[in-house]
Image (cartoon, rainbow, N blue to C red):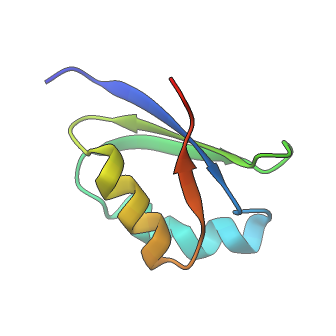
Amino acid sequence: MENKEFQFKTNIKCGGCVATVKPQLDNAEGICHWDVDTNTKDKILSVHSKGITVEEVIQKVQEAGFKIELLNQ
């Protein structure tokens, strides 16, 4: 399966927010790496996938209590 990178606009705005979403994304099967650029206006979450779908990433972030939408790729 090919690795893909997805980018999302979120409202994950600080280190505390990153810490809240961290268990959801770290424990998600199919993610090899992720990070959030909290210094940009759109708070871009980048996910390097090795099998997880866009829908699954969105569900994980929403379960942590954050807004998320896929950026056009």
Q: Quadrant of residue 63?
A: bottom left
Taking the spot 78% from the left edge, 62% from the top edge, the residue there is 13
Taking the spot 85% from the left edge, 46% from the top edge, the residue there is 41
**Residue 15, percent across and down?**
76, 66
Q: Is residue 52 above or below residue 71?
A: below
Taking the spot 80% from the left edge, 65% from the top edge, the residue there is 14
Nearest the viewer among 50 and 61 is: 61
Q: Is residue 5 above or below residue 23?
A: above
Quadrant housing the N terminus: top left
| Image-based side of 38 in relation to 66, left or right | right
Taking the spot 32% from the left edge, 64% from the top edge, the residue there is 27
Nearest the viewer among 62 and 1 is: 62
**Residue 68, percent across and down?**
56, 58
Q: Is residue 27 above or below residue 45?
A: below
Q: Quadrant of residue 19?
A: bottom right
Q: Is residue 34 above or below residue 48?
A: below
Q: Quadrant of residue 48?
A: top left
**Residue 49, percent across and down?**
33, 36
| Image-based side of 58 in relation to 35, left or right | left
| Image-based side of 20 in relation to 54, left or right | right
Q: Residue furthest left?
A: 1
Number of numbered discs present? 0
| Image-based side of 64 in relation to 24, left or right | right
